Image (cartoon, rainbow, N blue to C red):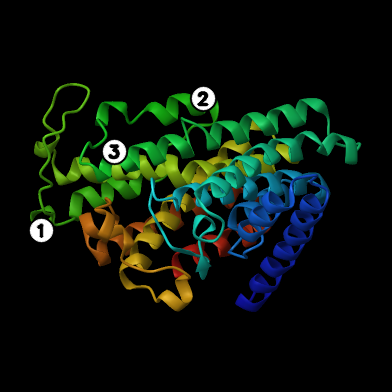
Amino acid sequence: MTISAFNVHLEELRTVIEVALVGTLDHAGWPNSLKTSVEYSLMAGGKRLRPILVLLANEVCGGRQEDAIPAACAIEMIHTYSLIHDDLPSMDDDDFRRGRLTSHKVFGEALAILAGDSLLTLAFETIASAGTSSGSVSGQQIAEQMRILASAAGGSGMVGGQVLDLEAERGAFVNVENSGIHAENAGKHSCNAGATAVRKDVSFADFSSVPVVKSTSRSDSGENVSNQSAETRVVELSQIHRMKTGSLIAGALELGAATASANQENRKRLHCYGHCIGLAFQITDDLLDVTGDQSKLGKKPGRDADLGKLTYPGLLGIETSRAKAEQLVQEACEAVAVFGDRSRWLKELARFIVERDH
């Protein structure tokens, strides 16, 4: 298999997703201003990583692509809503996204918030409507897809991770004792994806060069968080991104497996793969924010430092962060090795995640 074959397959999947998203918006009976603002963000391009993962997981489990398309569209809607809200002045206060002005800069904050709200609710409507367009999708399958999506996007997943990220900006770092929150909520599909890479970093990173973050905040246990070690902050940062980024990516894999009625073992393998590449994706994003080019990123680099965010390069340095991402890719590929040749696209995608320039 060549890189060009991989790129061709990704482009084929993107085309399927784009057509389905346009069709969904065409049927939305919304006020014109709302529809315009939603379309502005949803159809702004991007990698379409999460919906592609839904289709690839469905494919590797032997499912029918048409059964997975509604879930693929739904998770892209959730992702886009989160970007619209993340860019707001009360959150990350970004002016550019995907190479153009962010939603609130074009349509105002109120309409941007409502556009995000509409995408959030449309995601679940899209999955719920799948049963009326495909006789092969049962009500039980639809309910399970909704559960997976809600869990990945909610307080124990993406939204909870964003809360912890905002708290970290203020110096109120996460209490390590709470690091099991996501795993407990993930239930039987939880895994320790990325744990090997985290331990590897903690053992060889030079923490003597990591600045001590001054803060008077206290954790839930009353500990002065300014005394927390760099090792603790690495673990906390991994937990933040396991929830903020990894949950939705792992959810995409589990959604695809569910649309193919995969067994629990295969769903767990794909869930673990998702958490590994989710963390690798975030590390690469952190690195690109330091080393990337604005013309390729579609947004201004250096925003993480401006906001005082915890990042992997900031804690571990560039080279150690790259090594961590590579280790996570290796873990991801091992998680799906059982699928044999059918896992080739997933393995290629894991490589793409750490080698991309945007």
For label 2, the residue is 187
Residue 115: give x, y in percent of width and height.
61, 47
- Mark 3 falls on what kind of element? helix
Mark seen at residue 351: none
Q: Nearer the viewer, mark 1 or mark 2?
A: 1
Q: Is 296 left, or right, of 115 in this rendering? A: left
What residue is drawn where x is 73% and y is 58%? 17
User: Can I make out residue 358 in this image?
Assistant: no
What residue is drawn where x is 38% and y is 52%? 92
- Mark 1 falls on what kind of element? helix
CA distance separating discs 3 and 2: 26 Å
Position of the N terminus, as image quadrant, is: bottom right
Q: Amino acid at mark 2?
A: Gly
For label 3, the residue is 167
Counting residues from the N terminus, which is met first, the one under dot 1 or under dot 3?
A: 3
Label 1 with label 3: CB-CB less than 8 Å? no
In the depicted structure, whether residue 94 falls above or below residue 356 = above
User: Can I make out residue 14 in this image?
Assistant: yes
Q: Looking at the image, which is closer to me, 265 or 180?
A: 180
